[in-house]
Image: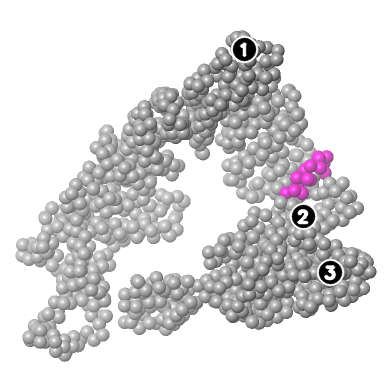
Amino acid sequence: MQRINILLTLLGAAGGETGARFQEVLLARMVEALTKKEEMMASPRDWVSTQAKKRQALQEGGTLRHTLWRHLQCVVTPLLASMVEVMDRFANLELLSDGNLSCGLVELWLNILADSQILDLTASQKPSKTDQEVLVQHYFVLDGEEHHCAAAFSWLLKMHLECLWEESEFIPAKQEGDDSRILQFVSSFNNGRLGRLFQTLSAEDKAQYGRHYLQDFLLLSLKIKTKDELMVFFRATSGCVSELQASMGVSSDLSPAWILAAARRFAPRLDALQHVLLLQPQLVTSITPQGSRQEMIEDILALGVCVEQAKSLLVTSLQECQEFVSRVEFLQPCLERAFGQKYRSLCSRGCLQELDSIRSLWHGVLGVASFIQHIIFKLPQSDSRLTKVALKHCNVYLKLTSESPDVRSVVTLERLIRILNSLHEECIHLDLRFGVSCPICFEEFTKPSVLPCQHITCLPCLQRYLPSHRRCPTCRMELPLNFNPTVSPNVEAALQQQAAIRDYCNGFFLEVVSRFCLSEGQQPAEGVVELLFSLLVFANGDVYRTRELTPFLQCVDNSPVVRSVLPKLLMQHSFDQVKVHIQTYLKNLEENLLSREDKTQLYLLFVNCFQDSLMCSEARETESKEQQRQADIRFLSRFARKQTPDRQEDHAEFLLHLAKLRICLNSAALQLEKAADQGRDDVDAQYLQQVKAVCEYSGNNWYRVYLLRAVHRLSGVDCVLSLMNCPQWRWVFPPELLRLQLMNPTSVDQFLCCGTSYQAVRNDVATFTLDPGAKDAVAKIEKLRGPQVSLLALALFRQITCRYKSQVAAIRPSEQERNRLENLLKGFRLNDYRDFCAALLSNQIGGAGSSLRVDAALSIQRQILLELLVHLDSVLLTGNLLLVPLKKIAFQPQTVTHSFLPTMADNHTSEAREWLKKEKLQKYYCANGHPCFVGECGKPVVLAKCPDCGQPIGGLNHHAVQGFTTDTRLGDQTRTGHILGEAYRRSDAPERQMLYAHSCILRLLTHLAMIQGAIRNQRSVAEMIHPRPADVTGFLWNHLEKDMRVLGRALDQNLDNTAITVHLILRACAEGTIGDLPEHVLLSHMHTHC
């Protein structure tokens, strides 16, 4: 009722000049809305006669005049109600009625209402029953009390500004950077219809409206519940506006556009402040900044208070430790976000200093929490002595973080090491008051034995000691004659417990080092690298030993090799410092006796460290590919001319250059892989020329070995053999290897992965080929049954077909050999399989008349695919029921031209249609078939253009434009056949919830079956493919080559191993047995196949 009373007051005489102007504007807007409503009616001029024809309405109204009046009420009342809801949103009418607005702001209020392009008051053309009830958003709530908005139409202004901000993202900026976008955004608002209204205000009215709008903006954007919280955010946002304008050299102006721009620019800081106040609402009264500062500092103050409160918590009991950790976990998400680089970029120099101090304090708090979690919580709760000692040292560490808040400093790290050693020593002396070192071997106890005097030694040491000495090695007390030393289970248990405590401390120390001292984006403090590296190396006289990263001197390793990953971490943060330490370490080790194996392992570790650091270095990431290429070429040139330090001159520099060489050789392997693929002319000849110089002038064949191994990792043995057979690339191979290959030529038979059965069949075929009278071999071949029959085709391909690749006539199969083998094949009853094998003898892969052949020009990848094709065909033709769908594609393609193929994409239109039914949307298509949707009544009422092709869509008065048609198709729209398109355009994402590797393998087998089908019936296979390609065979080869690449990435294997994986799957399919499959389900429905 209060809202109605305000409206009536403004419309009555009591409204004064403001009321009269309001009434005039409101009536004009109502006339405008009614006019638009009439335009949508079928026959607006006949409304009187239409109402006169309604007998029931006349009976209810009594007279025609009364009936017409009631009809007008039914039309006008909902319209007026909807207009009032918009005008009075958040009690906007109270601003006009309470008389507190200046004349300029009153005029602004009315001008906004009068402009239909700014404020849309048009009601829904077809209101539903739920639309008859108008929901009014009319109040803000602060401290439990309702408050009206402070600025006229603030909600409308916020929506308008947000739309402009989103549009500004797509407007090309005149200058680089975010500042240009903000200036364009402010300019767009000031030059718009709404902005021009604000330009008419006086300076005082602008300032007043800006302050009021900021208050409403915060209430609309944030979940603010109290006046104190509102004042905190008011000061913070005002500071953001001032800081933004000062950074851009703009005069101070608290206008709506600048408020939104500042809120967007400083959103991370405002979000952090909101998060802190949500966690700790009581902080509102504690973060009032002293003095007048033209910047935001409230978030920094709030974060500082949170950390100080967490730091002041006690840790004198397990319960308090639990509360401490819970508090840290409670605050950690908010604080970690505040320490990010994006957040820091929004802070001034003064705020950054405060933030760095808070970060140091917080790292100390995190360190204490880590101490509790890694040590205190892991100690056995049943032993109160250990808990007491751990709590004591935890308080010492907490005090250390207060005195030295920078946990990254050398001083703090050294004191932490002393604290951990003290904790370890006290824990040891609780049960082992004489320590953990044997007085005989001076090593840590193994199989501890307790003497009568309670001293402890190792049992093996004591057994060697007793025959010549009957006294305690520590106190010299004589031992009884009947003393029989045994292992003490109590001492052994205590040692195990102390080892566990030491592991807990090591884990905590490693986390402190990796999390704080070597944190990403931070350079280690001065001296930290030296300290950490010194912890890895233990010198005892001339003996150098190393250990894992640990603060305890007892943890040493008998090997001189640094086994810790710490050097890699250190190199990423301080490469030059670590290199100096590595040089010193290696020099000292060279002066001591080292086995060859240890020295090799040591050098290899540091080479790997250098290589990883170089690959991750910022310089390499910022350089372009061409810059990296030129740098590598210059390095290879220097290395070939031996202008780099050798091992005797500078150990570290020598290993660093070896690491660089390995990177260059890996790049060269990529180029050689291209060279092995015949027909590729995009090889970097200049780069490979420098690699050749290194290999030839260095006198070290291990560089060639490394390069060949890199090539093999990328592609496989066939690629290596292809390079070996090409005179241009023989420099890649050591001369001895070329000589051995010439004496004993070898080739790779990938079918050997099928096991000894295949090897026996291959040997029998070879024996029969060489000796036609070998009856044993013939008998074995004729006895092949079941899955073993498929192996014959593989053996024929390897022993006969592959020989067609040779250019030497004597090696190629003779006519007599082919005739003998054809006669042998006549004994097999499987006609299709017999014909397939006979075609292999004539170098016709896939059947008689096939254009697929093996010749000297055949590329490595194509040969591997042909081998897979032969293997698949052999399995399909020997009656395996599991692969019947693929058999139909391969040998009866005319029967599956309109069938669903494996791994093809589903169409989810029917599912989308079900989802959209809830929104009452009608689907249409433009003239080019692109879908779009019409809401409300489902009939078009406006004209537009298709966002995909620009064709006209929509319509007027429920009549669609030409070509804009309703969707009448029902049911599933999934297409049959091959619908992936060209290989370079297709998506490799798996379909139908399949695993990635599974989808890759099934798609590869499908394409192999299709290329086999194209051999016999290319037209039918072409009809499967949508859109139909001009070259069906080339289309399928492109897909097969991509299938191999994608599958290789999925398996993380080279080309050889990827092909072997598929061969193993086909072998398993050949050996597996399943029940009969009903023919009618094969490839007949998309849900029966993947």
In the rendered view, would you say 789 is above or below 519? below
Query: Marks 2 and 3, Cα distance to the nearest angstrom?
Result: 30 Å
Q: Amino acid at mark 2?
A: Val
Q: Mark 1, mark 3: which one is toward the viewer?
A: 1
- Pointer 2 residue: 717
Element at label 2: helix
Counting other residues with Cα less than 10 Å from the Cα at mark 1, is it few (<14), some (14-19), or many (20 or more)? few
Q: Indicate the position of residue 917 as horizontal and vertical percent values.
A: 37, 74
Q: Would residue 1076 appear left or right of 188 to someone viewing this image?
A: right
- Pointer 3 residue: 781
Q: Residue at x 74, y 55 (%)?
A: 716
Q: As rendered, which of 205 and 263 lies closer to the eye?
A: 263
Q: Earlier in the sequence, mark 2 or mark 3?
A: 2
Q: As rendered, which of 630 and 1065 lies closer to the eye?
A: 1065
Q: Residue at x 18, y 61 (%)?
A: 88
Q: Residue at x 31, y 39 (%)?
A: 298
Element at label 1: loop
Q: Residue at x 63, y 72 (%)?
A: 1075
Give residue 464's quadrant in the image: top right
- Pointer 1 residue: 480
Write down the region rendered in magenta.
Answer: 696-710
